Image (spheres, rainbow, N blue to C red):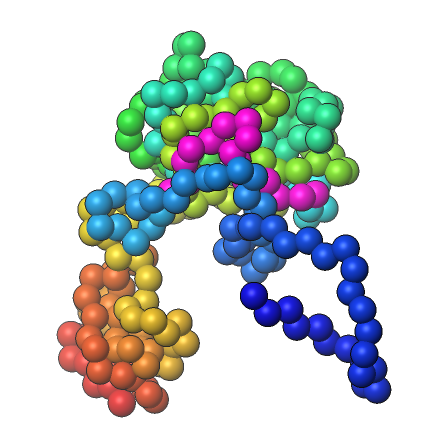
């Protein structure tokens, strides 16, 4: 481990005190606000041979948590929560998939997307009140979307509308943390989650269906989702309008993507440019 400190010009010595290092999972958005790992959370492929990983092994002592983030204080405005879950067999009552609550578990201005293991339903709670319920399916990956538009929440499963409910209250909750897989004594056990995100916008029904159809191939066996090789420095890009394939070049070769899934690759370095048209590829 290396600690690098940027000091002002002319400062040649100094001291550091009370430094804490914590294991965290990176935030893949432009905001870069990572989630701290509490205990041990398991990461494993979402399908045999797939690049994409899911998180599991949740309990009161094993979960992910993002400290207070003012960007998630949406007030009474629009917002959305979406992600994938494979509901397992070991789930506590009213288990929380994703929640934003204070450390004392106060329900004021809080929200929580939950599983009720007794009646096999998804629930959204805010201010300790149920906004909606919707049946769940176990042991298969499902894409869930909660979208609030103009004070009304809409719930979608696998891109299809399921139910709705009123939610006009504020969800500005100063000091609240986002917690994945656990709230109070309620945890999702051996369920797996992947690709969860929160936004200050509410996508349309058409956009939600497109996101589902774009991401679904990543949950298939042997689905590749990353650039080929060890380099992530893209040196050239080209899109073939005829084949609808994206070609991305790096020092490791050319990766070919159909949507979000890499369907093939070469191993010759691409240094300058790529041109692609009607399946004819020229690279340099």
Front residue of 58 and 19:
19
Q: Which image quarter: residue 186?
A: top right
Tell me: 23 left or right of 49: right
User: Residue, x 43% and y 26% (percent of image)?
Assistant: 189
Q: Is residue 58 magenta?
A: yes
Q: Is residue 202 magenta?
A: no
Q: Mark yes or no: residue 208 visible.
A: no
The C terminus sits in image quarter: bottom left
Q: Specify start and end residues of the magenta stretch as a single range.
A: 54-68
Q: Which image quarter: residue 138?
A: top left
Which residue sits furthest top?
A: 118
Q: Mark yes or no: residue 39 visible.
A: yes
The N terminus sits in image quarter: bottom right
Q: Up-down: is 271 above or below 73?
A: below
Front residue of 104 and 5:
5
Q: Up-down: is 276 above or below 79?
A: below
Which residue sits furthest left?
A: 279
User: Residue, x 21% and y 85% (percent of image)?
Assistant: 282
């Amino acid at each position: 481990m290396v600690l690098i400190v940027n000091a002002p010009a002319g400062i040649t010595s100094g001291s550091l005190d009370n430094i804490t290092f914590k294991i965290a999972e990176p935030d893949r958005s432009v905001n870069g606000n990572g989630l701290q790992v509490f205990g041990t959370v398991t990461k494993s492929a979402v399908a045999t041979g797939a690049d994409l990983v899911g998180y599991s092994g949740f309990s009161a002592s094993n979960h992910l948590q993002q400290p207070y983030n003012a960007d998630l204080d949406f007030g009474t405005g629009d917002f959305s929560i979406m992600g994938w879950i494979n509901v397992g067999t070991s789930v506590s009552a009213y288990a929380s998939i994703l929640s934003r609550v204070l450390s004392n578990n106060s329900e004021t201005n809080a929200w929580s997307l939950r599983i009720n293991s007794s009646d096999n339903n998804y629930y959204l709670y805010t201010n300790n009140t149920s906004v909606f319920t919707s049946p769940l399916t176990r042991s298969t990956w499902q894409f869930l979307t909660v979208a609030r538009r103009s004070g009304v929440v809409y719930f979608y499963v696998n891109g299809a509308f399921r139910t709705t409910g009123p939610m006009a209250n504020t969800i500005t909750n100063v000091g609240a943390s986002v917690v994945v897989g656990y709230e109070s004594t309620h945890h999702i056990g051996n369920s797996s989650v992947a690709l969860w995100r929160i936004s200050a916008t509410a996508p349309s029904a058409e956009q939600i269906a497109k996101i589902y159809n774009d991401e679904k191939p990543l949950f298939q066996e042997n689905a590749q989702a990353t650039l080929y090789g060890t380099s992530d420095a893209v040196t050239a890009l080209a899109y073939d309008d005829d084949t609808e394939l994206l070609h991305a070049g790096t020092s490791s070769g050319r990766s070919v993507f159909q949507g979000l899934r890499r369907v093939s690759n070469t191993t010759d370095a691409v240094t300058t440019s790529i041109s692609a048209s009607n399946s004819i590829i020229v690279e340099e």
